[in-house]
Amino acid sequence: MWHFRLWDVQDVAVFLSITLYMCYLAGAISIHSPQRSLTRSVQDDAFFSVDVTCSEVPTIQWTFMSGAVSRSIGTWQPGVYTNITVDYVNRVQAFDNGSMGLSDLRLQDAGYYVVTVTESAGSSKDAGFVLKVNEVIYEDLQYLSVSALALACLAGLLMLAMWLLDKAYRKLVAWRRRKQMPEADATELQRL
Ligand SMILES: *[C@@H]1O[C@H](CO)[C@@H](O)[C@H](O)[C@H]1NC(C)=O
Ligand SMILES: *[C@@H]1O[C@H](CO)[C@@H](O)[C@H](O)[C@H]1NC(C)=O
């Protein structure tokens, strides 16, 4: 009994010291984000929503990663300065709470987005996002091929209907001729 309790006390102590150490490492920074995974189509906009809280004005840095590629998107300090990388300057919008808007998506934009929040004391914290970008062309093609098939079926049906009508008309004409012939013969016979 006493033995177990001793272990419990030790566990609690270890847990507390780990928590305290983590708090010390993380400083007063906290990053809240409602959604960490986004799926968008080409030419759509993506909004990486975060809410950064920090005891002082933080430095926010966004980085893009995909395979071996890692490039800086931009760095800003809310109300102080905003520095967006040349490649992204027309497509990126920086928000005071740390959020980033990326517009006119391309297929190459798919990958990981990491926001790093740094305090002047040097402590930092980061959060990662996954962005999937879907191609829309395939959907359009599928839609096109389905409508082409429907149109072809309709054309086929119309052609069949016209062929049948034509046949029926010829039959009617032939039948009428056959019906009128004996009468004509009869009147001609009468006249004679
Ligand atoms: C951050 O700010 C933007 C713009 O004001 C807002 O749309 C977004 O919801 C905020 N994000 C969070 C997680 O609060
Ligand atoms: C903006 O960033 C670029 C590189 O990302 C750097 O060379 C430049 O000094 C920065 N400008 C400011 C004002 O921080």
Image (cartoon, rainbow, N blue to C red):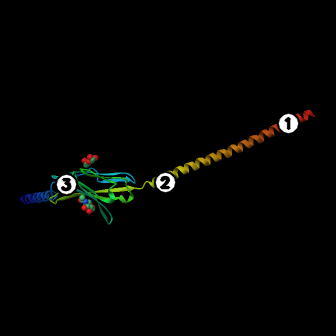
User: Mark 1 near mark 3, Cβ–Cβ under 8 Å?
Assistant: no
Q: In the rendered image, which quarter contains the N terminus?
A: bottom left
Query: Ligand 1 within 8 A of label 3's CB?
Result: no
Q: Nearer the viewer, residue 25 or 117?
A: 117
Residue 154 on image: x %, y %: 59, 47
Q: Residue most toward the right?
A: 192
Q: CA distance from mark 2 to mark 3?
A: 47 Å
Q: Secondary structure at mark 3?
A: loop
Query: Ligand 1 within 8 A of label 2's CB?
Result: no
Q: Nearer the viewer, residue 57 or 191?
A: 57
Provide the residue designation for mark 1. 184
User: Mark 1 near mark 2, Cβ–Cβ under 8 Å?
Assistant: no
Marker disc for residue 141:
2
User: Mark 2 near mark 3, Cβ–Cβ under 8 Å?
Assistant: no
Residue 183 on image: x %, y %: 84, 35
Q: Nearer the viewer, residue 4 or 181?
A: 181
